[in-house]
Image: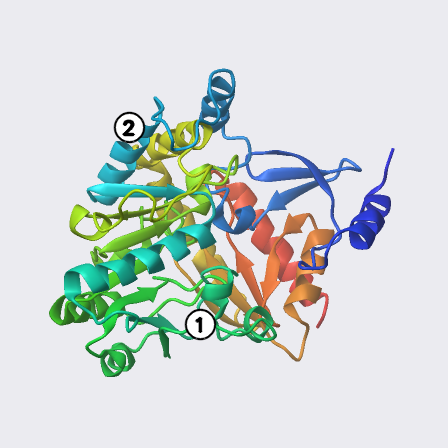
Amino acid sequence: MTTSAQLIEVIERRSAHNYHPLPVVICEAHGPWVTDVEGRRYLDFLSGYSSLNFGHGNPKIVEAAQDQLKNLTLTSRAFYHDQFAAFCAGLGDLTGKDMILPMNTGAEAVETAIKVARKWGYEVKGVEPEQANIIVMEDNFHGRTTTIISFSTDPDAHDGFGPYTPGFKIVKYGSVEAVREAVDANTVAVLLEPIQGEAGVLVPPDGYLTQVRELCSAEGILMIADEIQSGLGRTGKTFACDHEGVVPDMYVLGKALGGGVVPVSAIAANEDVLGVIKPGQHGSTFGGNPLACAVGNAVIELLNTGKYQARATRLGEVLQARLRELIGEGVVTVRGRGLWAGVDIDPSLATGREVSKALMERGVLAKDTHGSTIRLAPPIVISEEDLLWAVDQLADAIASFR
C-alpha cells in the first residue's frame, strides 16, 4: 500500500507549492466524514470552503450527475441542451432574478460580474468610456485572477503580480460612510461579501447591508453580493443577505452550487442589468454545460425544500454557543453565523496552523487563515452529536498548548 507520507513526498516534489495542505491524503468520503489512504476517518469541518454544504457524495446530487453522465456532458453554448432551461429558471426563481449567466469557478463569476457592471455603467448609467470604477472592501477575497488580486489587500494574493488592473476603490469593510465617501459620478457598483470568509468569517455590523443597499439605490449604482461562500444555506438562510432582507442587484454564486461534484458558478440579475451582454461579449466553453446544470438543478431542489437552511440555523446555534464557551480558554474571539465560524486563537498560545494540525490528530479537519484564526464550516448534514464531538476535540487541541 502507498502511504500518505509517500504520496505527500511525490506531491511536494512534482506539484507547484501554491497551497500548504495539512499532511493528510484523503481517498474516500461520505456525508461529513472523510477517510485517508491508511483508513483513518476524519470529520470534515471545512466542507471544501463551503463547496460541500450538502455533504460528500450527497445521494441526490450524485444520482443527478450519474444520470447525466450517461446521456450528455458537453455541447458548448454553441447549441441549446435539455438541462439549461431548468437551471436558468430554477436559479432565477431561487434568487428572484430574471436572468442567469453561468460560468464554472467562483473567480470566473466575479470577473463576469465586474464586466457586466462596467458595461451596464457605460450603456445604462452613461459613465464616460474607460472611466468606470467599482467600490470594493478591505480584506476581501473574490478569487485570484489578475484583475481580482489587483484590489486585494492580502499581500500573499496581491504582491508580486503587477501591473495591476485599475478601476477599483478599496474602502473599510463594515462602514457605510466609507462607501458613501468613495462614490463619484463614475461609480458603477459596490462589490462585497455579506460575510467575509477568507478574512476569518467577519460578520459586518447589523444594518450594514441594508444601508449599503439604500445607498446604492439612492446613487444609482449596482449592489453586487459575492455569496460564493456565504450563500446556499451555509448561514441558515438561502443567502447571507437574507438575514437583513436585502436583495442585491446581482448575486455572485459558486462553490456549493456544484454540490462538491463539479465546478458550477453563475451570476444572477434582472434583465435591465444582464441584458447589456450580447452574443460574443462574454462566454465559457464549459459554463452552463449539461452535467453542471444537472448537478445545479439537484442543488436547487435541495434548497427549495428549506430543510437545509433550517438545519443550519438550528445546528448553528449549537455550534456558536459551544464555541463561545471556549473564550478565555485559549480562544480570544468567536465570530460567525449559522454553520460558519471564525475562531481566533490566543497568538501567544499557538498559531492557527498548529491548532489545525493538533485538531487533525484528533480526527477533525479544519483550516487556518491569517495566522491565528481557524475557519469552521461543517457540512449542513452533520449530526448534532458529531458537531459537539468536533468542538470537544478543538477544546482538547487548544488545551494541549496551554
Residue underneath mark 2: 85
Question: Which quarter of the image is occupied by the N terminus?
Answer: top right
34 relative to 335, above or below: above
Question: What residue do we see at 52% from left, 38% from top?
Answer: 260
Q: CA distance from mark 2 to mark 1?
A: 35 Å
Q: Is residue 339 visible?
A: no
> Which residue is at the front of the view, 216 or 339?
216
For label 1, the crowd category at 10 Å Cα-Cα, with few meaning under 14, some 14 to 19 and many 20 or more, is many
Residue underneath mark 1: 151
Q: Which amino acid type is marked by label 1?
A: Phe
Q: How many marks?
A: 2
Q: Percent x, y for residue 393? A: 64, 54
For label 2, the crowd category at 10 Å Cα-Cα, with few meaning under 14, some 14 to 19 and many 20 or more, is few
Question: What residue do we see at 51% from left, 16% from top?
Answer: 70
> Which residue is at the front of the view, 58 or 224?
224
Q: Is residue 224 visible?
A: yes
> Which residue is at the front of the view, 348 or 49?
49
SS for callout 2: helix
48 relative to 91, above or below: below
Question: What residue do we see at 51% from left, 21% from top?
Answer: 69
Question: What residue do we see at 42% from left, 39% from top?
Answer: 287
Q: Do the residues under discs 2 and 1 have CB atoms within 8 angstroms?
A: no
Quadrant hosting residue 391 = bottom right
Q: Which amino acid type is marked by label 2?
A: Ala
